[in-house]
Image (spheres, rainbow, N blue to C red):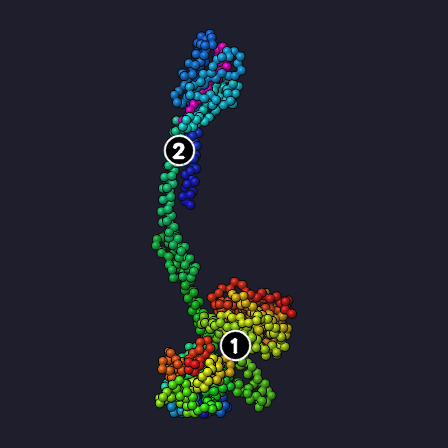
Amino acid sequence: MTVLLSAIATFTLGGFMSYTLADGLYESRLETALEDTSSAVNTVNRTLSGAAVSDETTLQTLLNSLVPTLEEAGSRKVALLRSPGQPQLQLLQSPVSADLDFQLIPDELRDAVRQGGNQLSYQAVELSSDQSTSPGLIVGAPVDVPLAGQFELYLVFDFFESQLTLDYVQQVLTIGGLILLAIIGVVSYFVTRRLVKPVLKAVEVSEEFAKGDLDRRVSEKGEDAVSTLARSLNRMARSLQQQIDQLDQLSKMQQRFVSDVSHELRTPMTTIKLAGEVIFAKRDDLDPSLRRSAELLHDQISRFEQLLADLLEISRYDAKAVTPDIESADLNGIVGRAIASIEPLAMNKETEIQIDIPSGSVDVELDPNRIERLLRNLLANAVEHGLGKPVRISVATDGHASAVTVSDQGDGMDQEQMDRVFDRFWRADPARQRSVGGTGLGLAIAMEDALLHNGWLEVASEKNKGTTFRLTLPVKTGYRLTDSPLPMQSTEELA
Amino acid sequence: MKILVVDDDNALREMVGIVLDNAGYQSVFCPDGAQAMVVFEEENPDLVLLDVMLPGEDGVSVCKKIRAVSGIPIIMLTARGETEDVVNGLEAGADDYIVKPFQPNELTARVKARLRPISGSETSVITVGPLVLDVQGHEVKRGEQVISLTPLEFKLLYTLASKPNLVFSREMLLDQVWEYDYKADTRLVNVHVQRLRAKVEDDPDNPKIVTTVRGIGYRAGSG
């Protein structure tokens, strides 16, 4: 960049200098040429008036002898042309320097000379010789010749030498410019390197920071702005690292706490469950209020147990301690098992479960227990929120991905509710009477299970129309999902 | 039938006792892993319920010690998802395990299954390869040499040997040997087949008596 800008500057300057030089040179040559021409005109006039010319032959001789006296070898040629349309002495020749082609003199210039009175007229032309062309100037003036009338004197100046000089100067300028440029380039390279290198280093390290490697440090040498930058960067990294460590520890402590609590609850839970069951088994021997108490105790112990199990599961996910038992299994079979286990609840709610699965088996690499639990969860949700209208479960596969959708035609949700549906302990309507002992962790765990399989779990819903959940799983664990073989079924299609 | 319950939680121990009493078993208790062997030798129980997490000495180690002197059924009580504990317990010689928290009928079903004698055998002697099984006497002989098997190992070998033409899937074995009527942990089968092979095969790495049928399960002999 620096070199490019310097190049532009150098060439602009060079161009300007060369233009000015050329212009000045031309102006000075023009001035000389004009003076030379005036003196030549004077010489011609003097010669003509001083000579006794009586006849055409002497005049011709005089004129012929005039031309060489005005010439200057190499740089000045002369033409003495007779203006056309003169009646007298028709045979009189127009003398011209030996190697000058008088056709070179443009007609416009000749017109200008004839009409210009005693004024000098001039025009720049290009002179071409055998090898090369060079700039030239033709200056003309009218001359009165006794007996013969009006002649035009033309002096042709060849600026070949000036052009040489100019070329040389331009060459020097160009070479000088190039050398200057090279020097600027080298100098700026070293200067920038010295200045920029620590900045580049800082940039590189800050990239590493951004990628999460907070152990990198920038060299803090020196007292300039760059080293201050380095020190700030290092300080920032240190304080970030500290905060992360702190948060990490807090999070670990919290996960540990949840896990410990769940663990510690398990033994009393076992005792309570055994006691509850023993009492429940003998409930028919109890009086009505004790019997009802035994039933409530029994139900709530189950719910409590499920909550404990879910909490432990979530804490295992949080601790990243979950590894799936992946095997190749038939998704249709898993769907069937999930439906079978939800059947009692569906019967209780008088909800029909419609099934739309492809024939044959749909083999997918997955953890069958987790996926069955996930589907059971979606089905239980659909039945619970389905207002007794049919719930539809569909399966499809395209060889790359397999999908299951579970749709109900119940309350539906608005966008805000949809955004939060996978949150822990979130309930669509806290005031709603609950019939199944959901823990509020079901969908959160379902999401974790889907992610564990590198799958998608998505929801689409419309208020008062219904809700669809779609699970998409890669057929082989290594595949990356790009799309799902099932659409997010709009709820109107259900009927 | 006498059952030894080894668990450090007083309430749970007592509650398990009540459940076992209701099912018609007599229970004796030990709260401490280090004391377990002493109580075991004093009481000479028919079955041991053994918690994994115990003070003094952990359940897996106690299980090993009991196995060293006796083949009686041992059922571990374990917390859910502690896969390593389960495998360690099974490899230490436990016959089965129950995940806490469990139902009373789950507990009694597991206990009953382990105490039930082999039923309905018409033949009293079965041979499989070089082995001779005395079904009534619960004894396996290779020639004149008696091989000592636990009741579970005997039942496993008997089940396979009684139908030598049949390939048993792990689920079938769980049903017939362990008496699980729902999907259970197939590691039970894997671990106990290994233990059985270690006792009856000449070269356990190249089994001739209990052979693996890839993708299906196990069978007696190489067919």
Residue occupied by mark 2: A170
Q: Is residue B109 visible?
A: yes
Q: Nearer the viewer, residue A222 or B139?
A: B139
Q: Quadrant of the C terminus of chain A?
A: bottom right
Q: Quadrant of the N terminus of chain A?
A: top left
Q: Nearer the viewer, mark 2 or mark 1?
A: 2
Would you place residue A248 above or below residue B143 in this image?
above
Quarter where residue B193 is shown:
bottom left
Residue B136 point in image, percent of width and height: 43, 92
Q: Amino acid at mark 2?
A: Gln
Q: Amino acid at mark 1?
A: Leu
Q: Main secondary structure of the magenta part?
A: strand
SS of the residue under disc 1: helix
The magenta stretch spans residue B169: no
Q: Is residue B65 left or right of residue B11?
A: left
Quarter where residue B145 is shown:
bottom left
Residue A481 point in image, percent of width and height: 51, 64
Task: Identify the subunit bearing mark 1.
Answer: A
Q: Is residue A314 visible?
A: no
Q: Earlier in the sequence, mark 2 or mark 1?
A: 2
Q: Nearer the viewer, residue B22 or A87?
A: A87
Q: Residue furthest front?
A: B223
| Magenta residue span | A144-160
Tell me how far mark 2 sits from mark 1, CA to CA: 92 Å
State the mark number for residue A307. Answer: 1
Classify mark 1: residues with Cα within 10 Å, few (<14), some (14-19) or many (20+): some
Going 43% across and 28% down the picture, which residue do you hit?
A133
Task: Identify the subunit bearing mark 2.
Answer: A
Classify mark 2: residues with Cα within 10 Å, few (<14), some (14-19) or many (20+): some
